Amino acid sequence: MNQYQVAFISLGCAKNLVNTEQMAALVRAAGHTIVPDPEGADVCVLNTCGFIDSAKREAIDHILELARLKEEGKLGRILVAGCLSQRYREDIRAELPEVDGMLGTGSYTEVVSAIEELMAGQQPERFGDISRTYEDGERLVSTVPWSAYLKIAEGCDNYCAFCIIPFLRGRYRSRSMESLLSEARALSDRGVKELIVIAQDITRYGMDLERRPMLAELLRELCKLDFHWIRLHYLYPDLITDELIDVMAENDKILNYLDIPIQHCNDRILRTMSRRGTKEQIVSLFAKLRARLPGLVLRTSLICGLPGEGEAEFEELCDFLEAQRIERAGVFQFSPEEGTRAYDMPDQVEPEVAQRRVELVVDIQSRIMDAWNEQRLGETLEVLCEGFDAEMDCFAGRSYADSVDIDGRVYFTAAGEVPPGTFVRVRITDTVDGDLMGEFEEEVAL
Ligand code: SF4
């Protein structure tokens, strides 16, 4: 069998990255070599995101860059996988002839045969069932040795009116507890200390298996393994049960950092968006969480300019944010996505107005984040060191309040060497542009 050099580029979210890692493991198991750079590779697999307009543009820019390499004779073939190919298969075929093959989100595990067909001069296109289950495959984990993602489910059943994901990723499918625990055990054996539990909606874990939420049970089992931090991403507010809060409160390993996308707070807008729950329920949930989880850092996602959002609803959102003091927020301008119900809803907001609202919310949130940072002065935080930052001329890491790639960092000085992946205590002495600065106190004994 011929052996090929295969490069992978993963765009979009961590959930997509896990699919890329699964594809890379399959390609390596088939005897091919994974190379870091598309330049010089036989095939580059571009695993794309097509979630919103900006992600689409990023994916197309990557395709054009790969096309240039191909034209210069520095790359053999281009295989596009993921959400963009799932969503725009016809357009890619018609308008991007440089793309040699495509895999839909239900067919990424067919990557090996697709590569072999590509190299035989064919143009494979595989678009299998997007709701199929693939849960036990190996992964070629590409993150730093001390942190890894654990994707506990695929797809989404929430069908928020603005979101294309359920149409690209299929129905919600929880992975079995056995498969997850065996993968988590393998990660822990390899030295992973920070496990980041992800899915489009982790609170729904188990509903499709046993018609009951099973996240609390899963977390109890994960806490028995040798992780130091367990971080949770994407909890839908309505299924944050008392049992789940108890598990989080009882286990120090589960960080008091929760990513709970709420999108908005106005009841009418929430209903229009088919979001379950009301502002009152969100407020009381946040109060309950803050009472049970000391020092809780909340992260959320917000959309400005949703259809029907007038000045009054927007002001309500601003007042809500000022009152709730949510420490971290991703703020997005509504992007009308073809194929979603919100695409042609009445009362669309002018893009310029939506953009101005985004800027106003970003301002509010920056002030909240700065105030939170100021309150840390003089405190000692546990920090996961990620290495020496030459530009800042000191070590850099993250505290419980900072997730990978999306939040701030803690920069700190130390007299001696602090190996990456070490947990240390850092006394906070300053704040700089949304980040914290401090001094090493001692290493944390794990
Ligand atoms: S919960 Fe809503 S916004 Fe999140 S992936 Fe599912 S449908 Fe999209």
Image (cartoon, rainbow, N blue to C red):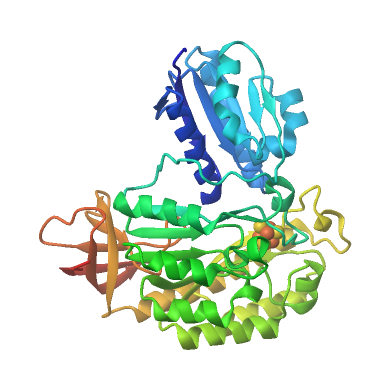
Specify the quadrant that holds the C terminus.
bottom left
Residue 208 coordinates in the image, percent (x, y): 67, 61
Left or right: where does residue 294 sit relative to residue 360?
left
- Rendered residue at 82%/54% (across/down): 343
Figure check: 64 above or below 23: above
- Rendered residue at 50%/39% (across/down): 22
Q: Quadrant of ligand 1?
A: bottom right
Residue 430 coordinates in the image, percent (x, y): 28, 72
| Location of residue 331 by image quarter | bottom right
Left or right: where does residue 186 sit relative to residue 126?
left
Can residue 262 be seen here? The reply is yes
Tally of numbered tags: 0
| Location of residue 83 by image quarter | top right
Comparing 173 with 438, the one in front is 173
Left or right: where does residue 207 sit relative to residue 312?
left
Comparing 287 with 364, the one in front is 287
